[in-house]
Amino acid sequence: MTLRQDQLIQQLPENGFNIAQTARKVGYSAQGSRSGTLYASLRSKIEKAFNPESVKAKILKAEQKFIKDNDNSNYARMVELQTKVVGLGKDSTATQVNVNINDTIAKLKANPIDVTP
């Protein structure tokens, strides 16, 4: 893989995974950035770079570096990221619910419930 292709793949997320726009940004010509051969040659490389297994491998490699450097803050972030990847951690957000019971009260006043035994 060429240096330009490496740069293109690294910058894809910054450009919304738009290959043509990223190719022009890293130095391909306007015509070359729309070339079918460029797309074909990059597809397999992109799939390899962004597949789940390679992402997991990058996470584990970073985790080992943080352990070695005794960087507990980033190590904790890696553990949090791993729990999200495997689905163990869930971000919880409080949900506010508004309930309008005016209609129910009006119906009960119009038709009271008989509770006598």
Image (tube, rainbow, N blue to C red):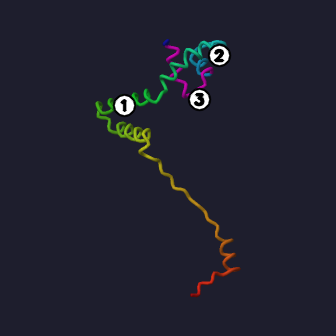
**How many angstroms separate mark 3 from mark 2 (CA)?**
16 Å
Which range is magenta?
A: 3-20
Q: Secondary structure at mark 2?
A: helix
**Which is more toward the observer, 116 or 76?**
116
Apparent side of residue 38 relative to residue 92 in the rendered image (left or right): right
Q: Is residue 80 above or below residue 51?
A: below
**Chain-order first, disc 2 or disc 1:** 2
Q: From the image, give the main secondary structure of the stretch colored magenta.
A: helix
Q: Secondary structure at mark 1?
A: helix
Q: Secondary structure at mark 3?
A: loop
In the rendered image, residue 89, in percent from the top left (x then y), is placed at 42, 46
In the rendered image, residue 88, in percent from the top left (x then y), is placed at 41, 44
**Chain-order first, disc 1 or disc 3:** 3
**How many angstroms separate mark 2 from mark 1 (CA)?**
35 Å
Query: What residue is shown with label 3?
Result: 16
Q: Is residue 52 above or below residue 88?
A: above
Q: Nearer the viewer, mark 1 or mark 3?
A: 1
Label 2 sits on what residue type?
Answer: Arg
**Chain-order first, disc 3 or disc 2:** 3
| Farthest-out residue, front | 117
Label 3 sits on what residue type?
Answer: Gly
